[in-house]
Amino acid sequence: MLEIRNLHVAIGDKPILAGIDLDVKAGEVHAIMGPNGSGKSTLAQVLAGREGYTVTAGSVRYLGQDLLALEPEQRARAGVFLAFQYPLEIPGVANVQLLRTALNSTRLARGEPELDAMDFLDAVKSKLALLGMDESFLYRAVNEGFSGGEKKRNEILQMAVLEPRLAILDETDSGLDIDALKTVAQGVNALKHPERAVILVTHYQRLLNYIVPDQVHVLAGGRIVRSGDARLALELEERGYGWLIPESGPLAEARP
Amino acid sequence: MTPSLYRQALEHAIGSPHQIASRKVALERFFTHGLPTTRDEDWKYTALDFLERAELHAPQHAAEDWAGEDYPGTVLKFGNGRMTDVFTQSIHAHSLADRADTPLVVRTLGLLADTLPGGAALAEINSALWQDGLLLHLPAGWKASPLFVVHSASEADAMLHVRNLIVLEAGAEAVLVEHYRGTPELAYWHNGVTEIVLGEGARLIHLKLTEESAAATHTGLTLVEQARDSRYHALSVNVGGRVVRHDIRVNLIERGAECQLDGLFIADARRHIDQHLHVDHAAPHTTSRQTWRGIAAGRGRGIFDARVVVQPGALKADAQQSSRNLLLSPHAEIDVKPQLEIHADDVKCGHGATVGQLDEAEIFYLRSRGIDADAARALLLRGFAGEALGLLDRTGLADWLEPHLAAAMPVLNKERSA
């Protein structure tokens, strides 16, 4: 589904990713772990199409297409979803408005008819129930005044409504208490499907107790320095990242 | 505009000999002041010299019929300055011209407008030349259903001096919508003065939609005096006209009076919109709120000048201003001037003002959900505008206003290539 080859990414003159190779197949869950500044979030943002990053070498193919040639909205309509580490607050735009506009944009792009307000509401209510969210969430401005946990749950709600093929969760577990973590994991697990794949970007092993990955990759200094199965995450929990980090030390993670 | 043109217009004015005499006095007062110029601090952004050069006249013709718009309430229509039709009878809303001789009007009209500090030249012209407008008088305890007052222009080069008088006695409640409009591309001048007197505990919700033709000039002055525990909640939506100037002056003269002045302006193309608010906290425990949102695109220009004065003795006064503005083109301009003038201790006052652009991170967030860039910008813009429109939720007016807003929103993809 996703083939990343020798991906090099820089912000300005500053290299952040220095040759990533990664294959994610349909039905798989991959965890990308690593210390702060290792380039995890950059990888997630580049896959979603955030401006400000320069791909200096390498390629990314998604379902046979050149992912990097697509606009962010084209990627989303093709089924790529990024759950943001820091979801944005959008005053004045109701959650329901964002969800419906997003879903209908995607449906139109696929040649499916738009859902009217009633059909949409029926569809979204079942997703709310799945995530234990109250209907009043729909009518609040997007993330405005939401707690950290509510924002993360709202990301998962968007994911559940849009039903992506490839979901990338960027530190969705950070700042969550254990109950919220379980709810988020439940939302992700409910989405699992032989035709879908999930990439979990995380600093800690904690989330992986609830969403068991098929593969774990450790990113350090802009490269994948170790890959393994779920047991690698447990080992990292015990030993930290120090033993895996190359002598040169990690490159600082930066945002545009 | 030579004095003789104003004097000719006065010949069309109505009223008793006594009223005509006071109109003449007002006109002579205006001649001594003249139109404001950019040398006046309050007018430094808005030049009216084009009015000096124009040759305008009192309206000669009855209004043309315009395509009917559905107004969800009682409607009074004024065309080219005179009342044309009352679609639903209201026992409290009348043509001011028809009632000019009544004791209430004789006693109240001009109380606020004629006592303005110097330089209120536009109010003086209006006092001299007003043709008609709304008289709304609610006796104590009455509640009126939503009242729509439509001022429509269809005569080229007409000067239309609109005068409204609203008196709510103790405990009365009303919802008033003023809608200013005109034949598309027609040049004319609407100069309105609205005097509002709120008795103890009275409540007025007042929406003013300025949707004049793209060649029109609109000058409007709203004057409010509030007695104890009264509440005035206004929303000004300025989305039309070529040159628009809107002043709101509120005097909180008794304890517990509250006002909320919200507004939205959209200055695109070559539109110039100048808004001045002045709130006077003259009594203890008075409250004022201002939430203003501005959008400028194309070569549009917006000005938001808001002054709050807390007089000595106005203890526990509570005043908050918020003004946020978006510039959508490199040729657009917005000037924001919030001012707090505090002469009392133990008050709670604050203000915040920003001028910025649409946030690229927010645009990316929406695009990452499958929404294309133009739709994302439009959604953010509508959301931004919506921040000033909280009043609508409580009045049921949102559905009525929505198509007007949608029509006024700048087209963003053009904007980017500009």
Image: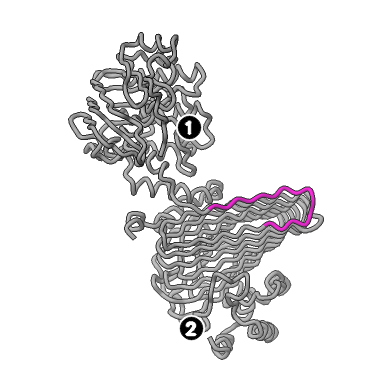
Residue depicted at 68% across the width and 56% down the height? B340
Q: Which subunit holds the residue at mark 2?
A: B
Label 1 vs label 2: CA separation? 55 Å
**Residue hosting label 1:** A137
Residue A135 drawn in magenta: no
Q: Amino acid at mark 1?
A: Phe
Q: Quadrant of the N terminus of chain A?
A: top left
Image coordinates of residue B275 in percent, x first then y, are 56, 64
Image check: A5 left or right of A141? left
Image coordinates of residue B62 in percent, x first then y, are 46, 78
Residue B226 visible to an observer of this rendering? no
Q: Please state the extent of the stretch shown in magenta in the rendering.
A: B340-354
Res B54 label: 2
Q: Which subunit holds the residue at mark 1?
A: A
Tell me which secondary structure the magenta stretch mostly adopts: strand
Residues at marks 1 and 2 on the same chain: no
Foreground of the two, A45 or B74 = A45
Q: Nearer the viewer, mark 1 or mark 2?
A: 2
Image check: A185 left or right of B20? left
Residue extending furthest right? B313
Q: Amino acid at mark 2?
A: Ala
* Colouring of the image: one colour
